[in-house]
Amino acid sequence: MEEVRGFVTVATGSDHYYKMAADLLLSYRGRGKGEYPFALICDRENEYTALFDHVILVREFRGSTVDKLLMRHAPYQESLFLDADILILENIDDLWDVFRDADDVSVFGQVLPLDSQEGWFTYEGSGKYKPLVRYLLSMNGGIYYFRKTARAEKIFDDALGVMEDYASIDFKYFDTPQDEPLMAMSLVINGCMPCEKEYPMTILPACSHKVTADFSGKVYEDKRPSDAKFIHFSTPRTKLFLYNYLNEINHHPDGWRTRGNFLKTRARFAAADAKFSLYHNAGAVLRRCGMAAVVRGLKRILH
């Protein structure tokens, strides 16, 4: 019998993505004390897939930048997709209540006017989809809510259709297709509204303040205790101290949380943290000076 509700994530390609998915699952079941089933959509079975309640094997978009669109194969009537580079800090099962009245496909985001300079694309640069664009959308693709309906299937199909027209649309931030701009356009042309409710989460890729943790695993933002229930990292940030220390806590009993282990872990990732900070701090300055080519060169050196 098909289960009604469940969480889902996607991992394809490198073992690193499978490990992130398993780390997400462990944080949901452990620190998050989650009670819903959790599915993994992936392209092969391995030691990590055995941990999940349901495993769905697919061959599309293997290792692709749009492989998150594979979430459509979730086995549940209602699904909450979580990006694999998320770690759960507190119970998030209340997300079902947050999205209770949501459209068939929804995200945390904000409806923007047509003349807004924010969002994933511009109204004037919407290409052949312009007649269908009634608003713009600011959103983060770390969490998607969706039901198994014909409308939801159309939204996923339309996102794939937008991928064919990617070069003719004024998408921001990414020169090649990514799941967020594709889904943003598809949600807009299908008239799906985002969930504009506030939810306690930290999104590190766009975070302008400093996020740290102490040896007990308590997270701080600008030195103030955070109320975030989860942190959405980016894949490069999963190789840094904060992600790995919080993850170590998930893998060890409470007695492991000592200042000594905290300092050892910080030392182990000190070089990686320094390189990452140097690249991003210098990159921000160079981009403002119109020196994007230098930023790309710096990235090759540091990474």
Image (cartoon, grey):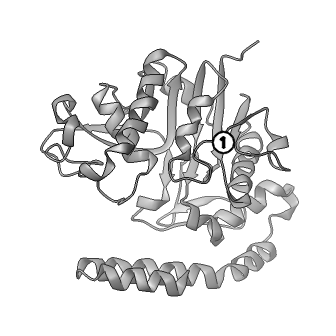
Q: Position of residue 125 (x, y in %)?
A: 18, 48
- Residue in the foreground of this view, choosing between 156 and 219: 156
Q: Is residue 67 left or right of residue 254?
A: left
Residue under the point 63% across and 43% down: 10
- Report whether residue 127 is seen: yes
Q: Position of residue 73 (x, y in %)?
A: 61, 29
Q: Is residue 283 left or right of residue 256?
A: left
Q: Amino acid at mark 1?
A: Arg
Q: Position of residue 293 (x, y in %)?
A: 33, 82
Residue under the point 21% across and 29% down: 132
Work out whether 214 lies above or below 155.
below
Q: Which residue is mark 1?
A: 59
Residue under the point 64% across and 63% down: 243
How crowded pointer 1 is (Cα within 10 Å; few <14, some 14-19, many 20+) is rated as few
- Residue in the foreground of this view, choosing between 60 and 137: 60
- Residue in the foreground of this view, choosing between 257 and 59: 59
Q: Where is the C terminus found, in terms of image quarters?
A: bottom right
Disc 1 is placed on an element classified as loop
Q: Quadrant of residue 235?
A: bottom right
Count of number-bearing discs: 1
Q: Is residue 196 left or right of residue 134?
A: right
